[in-house]
Amino acid sequence: MARRRLDAAAYTVGWICALPVELAAAQVMLDEEHLPHDGVGSTQYTLGRIGNHNVVLACLPAGQMGIGAAAFSAGQAMSNFKSIHSGLMVGVGGGTPSAEADVRLGDVVVSQPVRQHSGVVQYDFGKTGQGGRTTRTGSLNAPPKVLLHAVTQLRAHRYQDSLDRGSLATHLSAFDRHPDFCREQAGPDILFKATYHHDGGATCERCSKDNVVHRTARRTDKEVTIHYGTIASGNQVIKDGATRDRLSEELGGVLCFEMEAAGLMNDFPCLVVRGICDYADSHKNKAWQPYAAATAAACAKAILLLVPTAEVVKTTTVREACKYRVPFNLKGVPVGKFAERPRDTQALERVLLPQENVKGRRLLVAYGLGGMGKTQLAANFARRQPHSFSSVLWLDGSSESSLKQSFAAFASRIPAGQIPEASRLYAASQFGDVDAVVRDVLGWLSIADNSDWLMIVDNVDRDDRRREEDAEAYDVEEYVPDADHGSVLITTRLPHLGQIGEPWEVRKVDKEQAQAIFKTWYGRGVGREGDELLGLLDGLPLALAQAAAYMSETGTSFGTYTRLYTEQWRALMKPHDGRRMPLRNYANGSVATTWTISYTAVRARNKAAANLLLLWAHLDNKSLWHGLLAAASQESGVAAERTAAWLGEMACSEVEFVKAVGMLRSYSLIEEAGDQAGHSMHPVVHQWALHMQDDRQQTALSWLAVVLVGLAVPMKTEKKYWETQARLLPHAERCEKSSRDMVGKRRTRRHCYGQPTT
């Protein structure tokens, strides 16, 4: 039969490979090979048919590997074949054997969403924290639903005795005519202990047999098992068993490692199919690559044949599916430890997750006391469900100006051509009309086919009913798109905002959840000796986290901490200079008491860190970085002379600054800001730190904050002038408010004593 040449529009499936051996295996799976398409290089693609699907086979250029190369090749394929609706990434990978998954050489791993991961996770993208552990700060899209439905059918076939046309064995038999791909050429399947390193040479002949992991033999050497779950992708080859196992544990359990899929999932949504050719350890070699490539290709064909052609055509093309995608990142999002809270999480999922055949906007207002963990719940939801949304907007709702700047930051990440370029560039230049930027983003969210986004407006705590008294108060409804689609989550302390959507009160946690939160921060479980303390903290997540962090840091026992808590509570509730602390009604004072204990411990160990905490109360609670202080060390004159000695040392030495913020972080009083901006403080801690100061301290530290911000203002000729100005703006606004509040207090005091107020 003569080979056919089809129009480019006839090809609906893209099949990406990284290695020539993978491409060769894919070519064996073609039921028909087509002539090259006119206008496209004949050596760049292999065109053909599998079942009723016309398929484009593409391979990365020789010598190019990794996420970037994969993304480029997929982009080229989409550009040349605009009718591709579904994608497959098929090839070899390094297996992760474990007690849960008996992964062996020649087995196949298929990407499938599991828990917080969408099927693929980029293991080398994130921030390294304490103990070398990495926090992943991005997310990847899930495979297309039409392919996941086929995977479900394939999984059902394992329970059938007959070998039909869709079976793996049937397609593997096609390689009988190609000896290089046969199992016999691969050699023995040997797994060594994770800590045992290769003893040199091209094979493992010299490796100690005493370090071999003994496993139950399978029925035949040719038995292939298909595993379904998470695939870890990154830019470097994993060649160490201990590293492999550590990364797998951090990621919640992965089945294999590879180097390309993370570059595809968000721009070329696809199903990833990997044949296991090694165990991602120092014993890896290429002997198993041909057979593993064959098993992966056979599995991919089995899946593709389970996909009805009509269903493929019904789905959106890959180019259209990615049109409104904006990758989720954690800039400005808290990334602290999180203990599961099923009641609250299920409520968010029930209301906010998109559902097939259910139209309309979804809006939930999560309200509750400060410190109940509303922000952490929102952050965890966004991190666990990003594959359910085309884009996720994390907006700082603490003030109207902060909200507008958050819109501007998001605008900079919207694909070019979808909103005016001036709005995309506003965040970098701060030049133009920020209100116009907000309108453009809201308009973008209102586009009819841009319907699967998630907007989170966090910390909407300014009462819009008191705008005359608070210039930064605003009506959050004005910043929600009018379109009847999308998902909106608002976190607030204001119960009345529940009227604009479905209200959900975030309440204190029960004893079991309290123990889980405490264990997360304490490092070990809570026995009966902790019952009294947990009762005192009364299910307040922030108080639990801070108490556990204090005990972990100092080695304090439950009994000692409980005694300190009680004593501090009694002292706190006694009149202090004729006043009582302003947070005494917050959960019976447990939050304030916990912070008082932690603050006292910090001051005993590092007075400069304690002073920094108090000074911070007069600056914005987000994005404190060393550069804000450093300018003070370069100035002279009256302003510089007013800088406290402890602050001068910290300004001159970033090491001292790191020590101070490290001390504050160790007691959970502050946290990383979620990006490279520095550190942030919980707004309630921020308020507490201000009100615990007497008038003398407030006056002195407020002046010092003004001095710092003033000295940090850059010259217009500086390269990062606009960036620095944008970072300083919230701090300047806070200084102005702090000064205004103190003037108001003085006027009130003079009025009470019959003194002139001017």
Image (tube, rainbow, N blue to C red):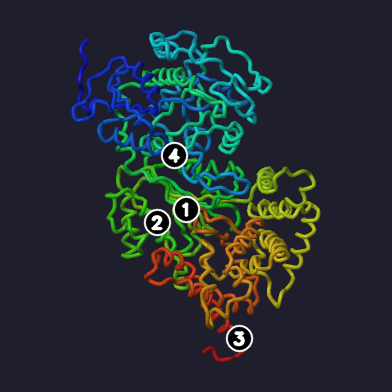
Report which residue position mark 1 lands on. Answer: 331
Residue corresponding to mark 2: 409
Q: What is the secondary structure assignment of the residue under circle 3?
A: helix
In percent of width and height, residue 375 lies at: 54, 53
Residue under pointer 4? 140
Which amino acid, by three-letter code, is at mark 4?
Leu
Query: Does the CB distance between marks 1 and 2 fall below 8 Å?
Result: yes
**Residue type for callout 3:** Cys
Label 2 or label 3, whichever comes before in sequence order: 2
- Classed neighbour count for the residue bearing mark 2: other residues with Cα under 10 Å, few (<14), some (14–19), many (≥20): many
Q: Nearer the viewer, residue 89 or 408?
A: 89
Q: CA distance from mark 4 to mark 3?
A: 61 Å
Mark earlier in primary sequence (1, 3): 1
> Residue 743 at x, y = what percent?
54, 81
Q: Is residue 460 left or right of residue 76?
A: right
Q: Nearer the viewer, residue 524 or 35?
A: 35
- Image: 724 above or below 73: below
Real-space CA distance between mark 2 and mark 4, rounded to the nearest whole angstrom: 20 Å
Residue 231 pos. (x, y %)? 49, 31
The quadrant where residue 606 appears: bottom right
Q: Earlier in the sequence, mark 1 or mark 4?
A: 4
Q: Residue 752, labelled with which disc? A: 3
Within 10 Å of disc 1 (Cα), the crowding (few <14, some 14-19, many 20+) is some
- Would you say 616 lies left or right of 431 here? right
Q: Which mark is residue 79?
A: none
